[in-house]
């Protein structure tokens, strides 16, 4: 049985043309909706993610973008994960510890420090080589600390609608690979 996808948006809740919103519609995914998507806070954002996880039946795979990735890693730190969360696709992690964030996106600083411990579930980090919100090397260091697989998206900006990644078909391929990677071992694929 394929896990249910849980969309975990970042700042601004990912607009109508963002791949997260399009995937929510396409795959019938659950979605985390923060009370104030422009004011992140580790505790309250993690609590809302926990509510959505508890309310969504079956096995789950989280798909976070940008500050949504930070929400997932803070949630894992605060809640220790959840037995039904089988994995996460972490796209374009934003670096809340970056001093330049004060000019780029000041609210992201509220998510500092970035948790740098292993995640309690398999994860795949997808990073762009020219993301303005995280250096490629820092994204790789995050993936290493989280014990996650790491994939480059090439020079893809912030991997959002503004950088030309609306439907993001390449992301769907990565999502499919991730879902198959977390298929229970008693299932044989051909």
Image: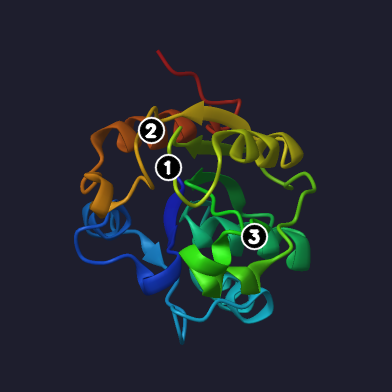
The answer to whether residue 178 is left or right of residue 157 is right
The reply to whether residue 57 is in sight is no
Counting from the top left corner in percent of width and height, residue 18 is at 26, 57
Q: Quadrant of residue 138?
A: top right
Disc 1 crowd, CA 10 A, few/some/many (<14, 14-19, 20+): few
The CA distance from mark 1 to mark 2 is 10 Å
Counting from the top left corner in percent of width and height, residue 183 is at 52, 32
Determine whether label 1 and label 3 are within 8 Å by CB: no
| SS for callout 3 | loop
Q: Residue at x 46, y 32 (%)?
A: 129
Q: Earlier in the sequence, mark 1 or mark 2?
A: 1
Spot the residue most to the bottom: 35
The CA distance from mark 2 to mark 3 is 35 Å
Q: Residue at x 49, y 52 (%)?
A: 133
Q: Residue at x 69, y 55 (%)?
A: 83
Disc 3 crowd, CA 10 A, few/some/many (<14, 14-19, 20+): few
Residue position marked by numbered label 2 in the rendering? 176
Locate the C terminus and report the quarter of the image it occupies: top left
Residue position marked by numbered label 1 in the rendering? 2
Q: Earlier in the sequence, mark 1 or mark 3?
A: 1
Task: Return the mark for residue 91.
Answer: none
Q: Nearer the viewer, mark 1 or mark 3?
A: 3
Residue 100 sits above or below residue 147 on the image = below
Counting from the top left corner in percent of width and height, residue 185 is at 61, 26
Task: Return the mark for residue 99.
Answer: 3
Q: Nearer the viewer, residue 12 or 120?
A: 12
The reply to whether residue 169 is in sight is yes
Q: Nearer the viewer, residue 148 or 114?
A: 114
The CA distance from mark 1 to mark 3 is 40 Å
């Amino acid at each position: 049985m394929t896990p249910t996808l849980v969309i975990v948006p970042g700042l601004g809740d990912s607009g109508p043309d963002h791949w997260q919103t399009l995937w929510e519609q396409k795959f019938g995914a659950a979605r985390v909706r923060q009370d104030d998507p422009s004011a992140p806070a580790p505790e309250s954002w993690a609590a809302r993610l926990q509510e959505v996880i508890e309310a969504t039946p079956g096995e789950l795979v989280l798909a976070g973008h940008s500050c949504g990735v930070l929400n997932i890693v803070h949630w894992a730190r605060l809640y220790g994960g959840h037995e039904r969360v089988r994995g996460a696709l972490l796209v374009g992690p934003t670096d809340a510890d970056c001093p330049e964030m004060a000019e780029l996106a000041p609210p992201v600083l509220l998510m500092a420090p970035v948790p740098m411990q292993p995640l309690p579930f398999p994860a795949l980090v997808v990073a762009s080589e020219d993301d303005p919100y995280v250096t490629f090397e820092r994204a790789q260091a995050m993936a290493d600390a989280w014990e996650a697989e790491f994939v480059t998206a090439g020079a893809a900006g912030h991997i959002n609608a503004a950088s030309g990644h609306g439907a993001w078909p390449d992301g769907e391929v990565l999502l499919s690979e991730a879902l198959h990677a977390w298929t229970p071992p008693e299932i044989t694929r051909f």
